[in-house]
Image (spheres, grey):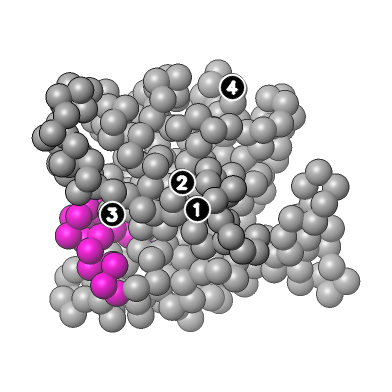
């Protein structure tokens, strides 16, 4: 539903208003103006996670994500070369997801996909998703993981926005953990995979996972490579709202694995992303990697 001022619209799910969003979601000019203001050179466009549609019938979900992906493609065409696409997939059906992945990369020219931190409560490190990750690796498609319908909502005390504030990073952290314990990076060593919200809670979980790797033979038998070493093959974004935490991410994941994240254009976002990096780091070359070069590498833009 579009508001009377035509500058906002309300996303309706199951006949109930879900979220009101600004026209920056669909007006390329608005995005370009904000990018110029904040110093962002290139922006990746991806679906709102609720539009993944994992929980609806697979054919309807396929139609939904195709529609959203086509809308992203239109915006890319309006973006003066400054937008790249990360499309959605109906991952409740692997065959349909792979088909759409080929369309995204081969026909629409997208640089990769955005997927949820879980697919109908199944962690992304589960072997049932290996055929999808194999195809993503084969097509050189980047995979960006964003929280969706997170676990633990029944443990939160407070209003609905706590889903974004606390449950999202928790689910992302568990998703990253499932990638490590599921051996995904050993099976697909060339896969480029990134996690939103600084990898969520994963940076805090990693020392325990590393200690468990040393203490429990059952864990070392399934991971083969230390969790700390595997973590440095993941990408994460910078969306942590804290310079000390951002410095911690660089220590955990490496200087070449952190890239700007904003959650633009939603209200709960990093409004001055470049300034946040500049506050955390004085070194000019490191700032350049975090604000631009690492994202180019993740998106495969250096290979174009």
Reading the chain from its start, which is encountered first: label 4 or label 2?
4
**Towards the viewer: 145 or 287:** 145
Secondary structure beneath dot 2 equals helix
Reading the chain from its start, which is encountered first: label 3 or label 4?
4
Secondary structure beneath dot 1 equals helix
Q: Which residue is mark 2?
A: 171
Q: Nearer the viewer, mark 4 or mark 1?
A: 1
Which residues are drawn in magenta?
243-260
Q: Is residue 50 visible?
A: yes
Residue 76 image position (x, y, % from top left): 56, 54
Q: Quadrant of the C terminus?
A: top left
Does the segment drawn in magenta span residue 43?
no
Q: Which mark is residue 280?
A: none
Furthest toward the left, the residue is 214
- Residue at image location 21% in from the left, 27% down from the top: 219
Residue 136 image position (x, y, % from top left): 40, 30
Label 3 crowding class (10 Å Cα cut-off): few <14, some 14-19, many 20+? some
Q: Nearer the viewer, mark 4 or mark 2?
A: 2
Furthest toward the right, the residue is 4
Asked whether disc 1 touches disc 2, contact meaning CB atoms under 8 Å apart, the reply is yes
Q: Which residue is mark 4?
A: 93
Reading the chain from its start, which is encountered first: label 3 or label 2?
2
What whole-number distance in Å separates the C-alpha atoms at marks 3 and 4? 33 Å
Q: Which mark is residue 168?
A: 1
Secondary structure beneath dot 4 equals loop
Q: Is residue 27 left or right of residue 184?
A: right
- Residue at image location 28% in from the left, 58% down from the top: 258
What whole-number distance in Å separates the C-alpha atoms at marks 3 and 2? 13 Å
Q: Which residue is mark 3?
A: 204
């Amino acid at each position: 539903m579009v508001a009377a001022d035509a500058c906002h619209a309300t996303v309706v799910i199951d006949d109930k208003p879900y979220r009101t969003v600004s026209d920056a979601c669909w007006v390329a000019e608005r995005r370009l103006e904000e990018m110029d203001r904040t110093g962002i050179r290139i922006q990746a466009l991806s679906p709102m996670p609720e539009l993944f549609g994992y929980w609806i019938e697979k054919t309807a979900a396929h139609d939904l994500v195709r529609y959203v992906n086509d809308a992203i493609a239109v915006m890319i065409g309006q973006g003066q070369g400054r937008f790249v696409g990360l499309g959605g997939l109906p991952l409740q059906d692997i065959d349909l997801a792979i088909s759409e992945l080929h369309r995204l990369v081969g026909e629409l020219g997208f640089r990769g996909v955005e997927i949820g931190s879980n697919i109908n409560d199944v962690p992304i490190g589960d072997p049932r998703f290996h055929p999808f990750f194999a195809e993503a690796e084969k097509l050189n498609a980047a995979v960006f993981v964003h929280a969706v319908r997170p676990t633990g909502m029944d443990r939160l005390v407070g209003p609905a926005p706590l889903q974004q504030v606390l449950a999202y990073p928790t689910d992302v952290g568990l998703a990253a953990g499932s990638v490590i314990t599921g051996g995904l990076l050993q099976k697909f060593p060339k896969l480029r995979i990134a996690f939103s919200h600084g990898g969520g809670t994963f940076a805090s979980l990693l020392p325990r996972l590393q200690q468990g790797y040393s203490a429990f033979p059952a864990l070392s038998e399934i991971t083969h490579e230390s969790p700390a070493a595997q973590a440095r093959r993941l990408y994460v974004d910078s969306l942590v709202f804290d310079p000390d935490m951002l410095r911690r991410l660089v220590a955990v994941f490496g200087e070449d694995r952190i890239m700007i994240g904003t959650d633009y254009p939603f209200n709960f976002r990093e409004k001055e992303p470049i300034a946040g990096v500049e506050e955390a780091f004085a070194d000019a070359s490191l700032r350049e990697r975090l604000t631009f070069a690492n994202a180019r590498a993740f998106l495969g833009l250096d290979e174009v």
